[in-house]
Amino acid sequence: MSRDCIYIIDTFSLMFQVFHAIPAMTGTQGQPTNAVFGFTRDIFGILERKPTHLICAFDSPGPGKRSEIFNAYKANRAEMPEDLRPQIPLIKELLQGFRIPILECAEWEADDVIATVTTAASARDMEVVIVTTDKDARQLLSPTVRMLNCRKNTFFDGAALMEVWGVRPDQVVDFQSLVGDSVDNVPGVPKVGPKTARTLLESYGTLDHVLANADKAPGKKLQENLIAFADQARMSRELVRLRTDLPLEIDFEAARIQTPDRATLHEFFKLLNFRRFAAVMSDEASIDPTTVVDESLLKEPSALVPEAAPAVTGSASVDEFIRPRQQTLFE
């Protein structure tokens, strides 16, 4: 008997991807909908992979615990686009219609929620697929934990990690502590890039051993930096290490794939002018309402719409982007 497989979606990561990849769209009331449209398409694509369970992890609003460690954490992040902000409650409404649980934890990020769920699922002998391109999730990889890039339709595992970074999953946190992360404004150690970090970890195994042997590192300047910025590297480790023990109530039965609330989704898709999605959820549909969308919708979002295409307005149909394909999705 095959083991259960849970997919855990890094919701904001996926939402930003599709928002920036799909031209502006509006629903019947003029509301922006391009992120919701892309997210809906990705949900169908993920369900087509036949997971037994599915959960969406959300970031909690406001400053988090990591800002207490380093007040400049994520200081480089731009403000959320105005057209994306109102689509967040719509995505939550979409997930409710699909009966997909939403998990978040006050003062912690979606990555920490993902790490906690991954740990709990692994303890239940489940396979885990983390739907994200966030490099922080690489520390969670194991023989039963992989990452999925929806845009490229590719999986990332421990072997891929060794190929691109030259480290094991248990060395990812130390690797990032040395290299830093400009996206999250994690400082790391100056002048230590991926190749140097890889060499150091190959020689000494862990960050603590690297710092303890700083005087043996190749090159005087590297030695000086490892000594001068040792505390900064340790702080960076606290920033990049994900929490696996958040106080979450994880209901794995609620996360088991269920038949969607077709009536609710039908009205929801009508409101957003997603006509084909509405059709597949309609009681009067001549096709099976549990069908998935055409394979073209599971590819790179830019493949859906010509580059520099005009905005899709509420009066336009999105049928040209969606064609149903007969295949049972929910069993």
Image (cartoon, helix red, strand yellow):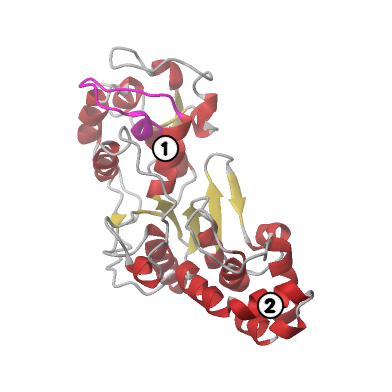
Image quadrant for the C terminus? top left
Q: Is residue 321 above or below residue 36?
A: above
Pick out the residue farthest to the bottom.
212
Residues drawn in magenta: 22-38
Eyeballing the image, is 294 above or below 51?
above
Query: Residue 148 vs residue 211: left or right?
Result: left
Which secondary structure is most common in the magenta stretch? loop
Residue under label 1, please give it.
Answer: 44
| x and y, in percent, of residue 299 in the image | 54, 32
User: 270 or 330, which lies in front?
Assistant: 270
Crowd around label 2: few <14 · some 14–19 · many ≥20 (10 Å): some
User: Which residue does the image show at 49% across and 51% down from the upper left?
Assistant: 132
Q: Are marks 2 and 1 in contact (CB under 8 Å)?
A: no
Task: Locate residue 139 relative to residue 220 in the image: left or right.
Answer: left
Give the mark, 2 or 1, whose residue is nearer the N terminus: 1
Residue that lies at the very extreme toward the top in this rendered image: 315
Q: Position of residue 148 (x, y in %)?
A: 54, 50
Across and down, in percent, residue 293 comes to 44, 29
Assess whether residue 24 is covered by the magenta stretch: yes
- Asked which secondary structure carries label 1, the reply is helix
| Crowd class of label 1 (few under 14; some 14 to 19; many from 20; radius 10 Å) | some
Q: Is residue 130 above or below residue 142?
A: above
Q: Which residue is pictured at 27% across the width and 55% down the height?
A: 61
Please identify, in this view, whether the residue under mark 2 or under mark 1 is nearer the observer: 2
Identify which residue is drawn at 54% across, 39% down: 151
Per the model, the C-alpha gap separating discs 2 and 1 is 52 Å
Q: Where is residue 97, by image quadrant? A: top left
Would you name the residue on which mark 2 appears? 224
